[in-house]
Each structure stands twice: as structure tokens, then as C-alpha cells.
Image: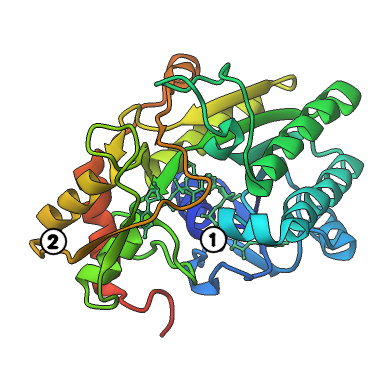
Amino acid sequence: MILVVGGAGYIGSHSVRELLDQQYQVVVLDNLSTGHRDAVDSRAVFVEGNLGDLEVLNHVFSTYQIEAVMHFAANSLVGESVINPLKYYQNNVSATLTLLEVMLQHDVKKFIFSSTAATYGIPNVDLITEGTETNPINPYGQSKLMVEKVIHDCHLAYGLSYVVLRYFNAAGAHVTGEIGEDHTPESHLIPIILQHLLGQRENITVFGDDYSTHDGTCIRDYIHITDLAEAHILSLKSLLENNQLTETYNLGNGQGYSVKEIIEMCEKVTGIKANVIIGDRRPGDPASLIASSEKIYNNLHWKTKYNLEEIIQTAWNWHKNNPIGFQK
Ligand SMILES: NC(=O)c1ccc[n+]([C@@H]2O[C@H](COP(=O)([O-])OP(=O)(O)OC[C@H]3O[C@@H](n4cnc5c(N)ncnc54)[C@H](O)[C@@H]3O)[C@@H](O)[C@H]2O)c1
Ligand SMILES: O=c1ccn([C@@H]2O[C@H](COP(=O)(O)OP(=O)(O)O[C@H]3O[C@H](CO)[C@@H](O)[C@H](O)[C@H]3O)[C@@H](O)[C@H]2O)c(=O)[nH]1
């Protein structure tokens, strides 16, 4: 079985769905701190608990025959990490050490870790490769980079085999419209715009239009959640075939869109005009983050299937049909 830690969250729940659709058996461990029980596919075993809890972990690893672990659970609000760094080092780093310890005690040595473009900080290249220097500028990015280093040391010392996936901006929803993004508070651009277009917010604030980009607003690389999920499956397959894997991959579309372009695409998809306010820059936002995902294309033949319009269309279907998310 595959243990998915954080499988009730946005990216985890879509990966669980993909794993089950591809005939893997799945156990989800999640404390529901930001995730939703209803996001977890009913075909998966669900264990409610904390990833830093030795007792729960020992129960999971001794009850189920776990072949590999996908680890999505984390706190991931950049602003909050600056104000409350210990929460981030505690949940993202310390609890992960407990997970790794129990995994290794149970001789489970295959690990897929959700990392982030935030490990690069403010890169001085147009297209970020895995070789681009990592220099996180906030505790969130720092906590992810720390875990990356721990994982590598566990490889050297205990033979842990791993794939680190550095996601760029995850977006969109499952094509069925059955699961999608539901964060409280919501901080991500696309759901915020769509909530506004649904009448749930009065306006959208663009965080700065004086960046050195073609229209002055920040550029990001948006990637569909199912494309991310597929990258996890391919990574899992490569791990199951190789006991000594130590790979790090960027996951993005390789194409950047500005905040203004995202708003325009949301208006096009929904046919509704947005009420846009230009605000101040949000501290810690790099002007542009675009991934080169050449490495995973070359090594695992991964290709993205969804373009920006399709990403926004699937997100719109989800928000329109579930205006209060998973709440019933
Ligand atoms: N959303 C993005 O654009 C993005 C980009 C880069 C990286 N990431 C990373 O991807 C991963 C998933 O992100 P997401 O957007 O799905 O977040 P999410 O908050 O929707 O999901 C995280 C899940 O982990 C669970 N969790 C948190 N702490 C836990 C703990 N101690 N024990 C058990 N469960 C716990 C939460 O309840 C939630 O279900 C995170 O590690 C995040 O840092 C996300
Ligand atoms: O109301 C809003 C919300 C966002 N933005 C801008 O939109 C862009 C995208 O912002 P957001 O959706 O919050 O994503 P990021 O800050 O780029 O961070 C996401 O993508 C990173 C990787 O690129 C991950 O590390 C993070 O976890 C994930 O939240 C940024 O320029 C923001 O300044 C606005 O202008 N107005």
C-alpha cells in the first residue's frame, strides 16, 4: 500500500484519486488541520492523526504493508511562516523527522516529498532549473529546504530512496468537479479571483503593478493539480523500480503568466468582468518564477496535459458547483 500523509489536502486528495484510479491501494494519514474528510476518496483507508505522533505512526506502519510514502502534509502560508516560524519548523521539519524515523524503523525506504519553488527564493534566472541556487527568503521555503537536506542525509546513512518534487503554482480542480481547492483562509490567486466572480468577495487586489515584468505584475508558472498528481505516480513507479534513487524535480508548465493575465483568463472563462484594485506589493513576492521541467520530461517522460484556460475552467467548475467548498 501507499501511505499518503496529508492526503485530505488540496494536492494530496487529487494524488490519492489518481493513485486509486491507477489501481494502487492507499492509506491516508491526515489530522484535518487544513484538509477535509470529504476530499478523501472512499476507496482509500483513512486514519485521522498527526504525522508527528509516534503511536499513530507505529499503528499505521504495523497495520498496513506500506511500500512507499508520499508526504504532502505541511503548513504552507508564506506570510504566516514569517510571523510564526516555529509553527513551520515544528510541523514541516520536526514532525517530518518523526515520520522518517518510524518509516526507517519499519524498513520503509521509499519517499516522495512535496517541496516548493519557494526554496529558490528570488532567483536571478528566467527559467529555473533544479541546478539553480536555492536561497529561500522565508521560514516556509527554509523549512522545505531543510527537509530536502535531511532526506538526502537519510539516503547516505540509511539507504532511503527518494524523489523531491518542487511544485510551482498548483491550480485547477479534478475534471469531474468532485474535488478541488478549499483553503480557509484562501490566499491563492485563482480561487480568490473565482470567489470574487461568484460574488463572494467585493473585489480583487493585485499585489503590486510596479515589478520589472511586461505589465508590472508578478509572473508565476501555474500547473494543473492532475498533472502534479501524474508526476507523483511516475515518481512512485521510478522509486518502486530503483532502491537508490535520489532525484529532485521541478514541476511547472514552463510558461509564466502575470497576475493581470490570470485575471483576464478568469474573465474569459467565466464571462464575468472583475472589479480590480491595484494594491501594494506583498512582502516576499519574487517578480517572476518560471520552471524548467526538462529534467522530469527527459527522465520520466512526464508531460503536462492542461493549459492555463483548462486549469481555470476546471477550477471554475469546482467553485461554481461547490461555492462553500467541502462544507455541506
Ligand atoms: N498549493 C501550492 O501551490 C503548493 C506549491 C508548492 C508546494 N506545496 C506543498 O504541497 C503540499 C500540499 O499543499 P496543499 O496546497 O495541498 O496544502 P493543504 O493545506 O491543502 O494540504 C495539507 C494537508 O496536510 C494535513 N496536515 C498538515 N499538518 C499535518 C500533520 N501534522 N499531521 C497530519 N496531517 C497534517 C492538512 O490537514 C491537509 O490535509 C504542502 O507540503 C505544500 O507545502 C503546495
Ligand atoms: O489576492 C491576491 C493573491 C495573490 N496575488 C499575486 O498572485 C501571485 C500568485 O500568488 P499565490 O497564488 O498566493 O501563490 P504564490 O505566492 O506564488 O505561492 C504558491 O506557489 C509557490 C510556488 O511557486 C508555493 O511555494 C506556495 O506554497 C504557493 O502558495 C503572486 O504574485 C501574488 O502576489 C495577488 O495579486 N492578489
Q: Quadrant of residue 187?
A: bottom left
Disc 2 CB within 8 Å of nearest ligand 2 atom: no
Disc 2 marks which amino acid?
Thr
Q: Tell me what residue is drawn at x 57 percent, y 31 percent.
A: 120
With 81 as the anchor, is 152 left or right in this view? right
Q: Position of residue 296 (x, y in %)?
A: 48, 21
Q: Tell me what residue is drawn at x 49 percent, y 22 percent.
A: 124
Q: Position of residue 235 (x, y in %)?
A: 56, 30
Q: How would you rate the neighbour count of disc 1 (Cα within 10 Å): few for under 14, some for 14-19, many for 20 or more?
A: many
Q: Quadrant of residue 182?
A: bottom left
| Disc 1, SS | loop
Q: Tell me what residue is drawn at x 86 percent, y 38 percent.
A: 107
Q: Residue at label 2?
A: 270
With 156 as the anchor, is 33 left or right in this view? left
Q: Is residue 168 above or below residue 41?
A: above
Number of the front mark, 1 or 2: 2
Work out whether residue 91 or residue 62 is closer to the camera in this orientation and state it: 91
**Colour convention:** rainbow
Residue 1 in sight = no
Q: In terms of sequence position, does the residue under pointer 1 or pointer 2 come before the other?
A: 1
